[in-house]
Image (tube, rainbow, N blue to C red):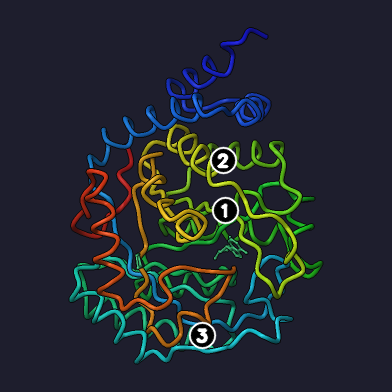
Amino acid sequence: MSLSAPEALLEKLAAEHRLTETEYRRLIEARTPELASAAAGKADRVRREIYGNGVFLRGLIEISSICKNDCYYCGLRRSNAACERYRLSPREILDCAAEGYGLGFRTFVLQGGEDGYYTDEVLCPLVAELKAAYPDCAVTLSLGERGAESFARLREAGADRYLLRHETADRAHYEKLHPPEMSFTHRMDCLRALRELGYQVGCGFMVGSPFQTPAELAKDLVFIGDFRPDMCGIGPFIPHHDTPFRDEAAGSVELTLYLLSLIRLIHPPVLLPATTALGTLDPKGREKGILAGANVVMPNLSPVAVRKKYELYDNKICTGEESAQCLGCLTGRLRSIGFEPAAGRGDVKLI
Ligand code: 5AD
Ligand code: FES
């Protein structure tokens, strides 16, 4: 193959928005700083064509650190006896949203472990109350796997979006990251059920998770091209000291940035966050993420008292900041690179 082949693949991806699994793998394996910067340039251009220099802000409310699952990578896994558990009451969640609304947020993301307390009986009235109090806002749920019936009830109650990272599109890899009682099939079924119910759906994966190679990443890119998610959350894997993966290496910031660019080219309108994990591994990680093609940031709106307890991985940033400080900090960071917080709910602009 000629030396220019990866550049040619990148051109093809930008023009046709699709490569084969083998081609994705080659593009990932061939990454150099030059190729990454070419990918970022193209991703930046297509993102600007659709969304300009606006970046959407989502107010993240971490509603519970209690989880019935035991994912090997996650600090909230049920076997982690050292994790301090908490849950916010509906009243506390509404208070966070009120503060967030006052700060200008028009999307609230309720994220938490799979905590049995949040039955449909608890969540549906909460979602309905949020939508009634803030009709100009989107409510995004990120509460793990639930039954299709539950997804349907929550949608009827007014939930607009659902984030459920697929974690890896390769079944064998999925089984290395999760205990036997968790099912790759069920996770993928959840994503399809959410789509059918009319949610804006987000999938996503960690970059540099244990056992991941370019082959698994290529499958993730094929999956994203096929599923065409409205949102896609990717961030580097960061080991948590109280998990089985404590001694694993963290994922690469550079590879994460490159994949952000490729995902933007695969699915131009996708809402792509520059994640907190990226900002945790690199002090300028989120700015670099935006410059690589991301267009969403998610400042933390959780009560300061619980933020350290919501510890998916080590050294998470923003745990001591008040909500207004996080917002101010991120707004300043965006402006420093020529971007602006965008007004409104920030729905996906399907083209
Ligand atoms: N490092 C990075 N991301 C993690 N997540 C969970 N644990 C870690 C970790 N150790 C991600 C998963 C999950 C999301 C909420 O956080 O992808 O879906
Ligand atoms: Fe939270 Fe900077 S974004 S403090």
- In which quadrant of the rendered view does residue 298 lie? bottom left
Q: Which percent across, then down, holds residue 297?
A: 35, 57
As rendered, which of 1 and 151 lies closer to the eye?
1
Secondary structure under the numbered disc 2 in the rendered image: helix
Q: Is residue 235 left or right of residue 289?
A: right
Residue drawn where x is 50% and y is 68% of the image: 316
Residue name at image x 68 percent, y 9 percent: 1
Q: Which quarter of the picture shows residue 95?
A: bottom left
The amino acid pointed to by label 1 is Pro
Asked if one can make out residue 273 in the rendered structure from this viewpoint, the answer is no
Residue 8 placed where, x, y %? Answer: 52, 14
Q: Secondary structure at mark 1?
A: strand
Residue under label 1: 236
Q: Position of residue 50 (x, y in %)?
A: 27, 37
Amino acid under disc 3: Tyr
* 3D distance between C-alphas at marks 3 and 1: 29 Å
Q: What percent of the width, then of the height, locates residue 328?
A: 24, 66
State ligand 1's quadrant.
bottom right
162 w.r.t. 218: above or below:
below
Q: Furthest-front residue in view?
A: 283
The residue sitting at 41% across, 48% down in the picture is 272
> Residue 255 shows which numbered tag?
2
Q: Is residue 240 left or right of residue 109?
A: right
Query: Which type of secondary structure does the marked residue at label 3 adopt?
Result: loop
Label 2 CB less than 8 angstroms from ligand 1: no
**Which amino acid does the dot numbered 2 rest on?**
Leu
The earlier-in-sequence mark between 1 and 2 is 1
Ligand 1 within 8 Å of disc 1? The answer is yes
1 and 2 marks in contact (CB < 8 Å): yes
Q: Is residue 221 above or below residue 307?
A: above
- Which residue position holds label 3? 118
Tell me if I can see residue 73 in this picture. yes
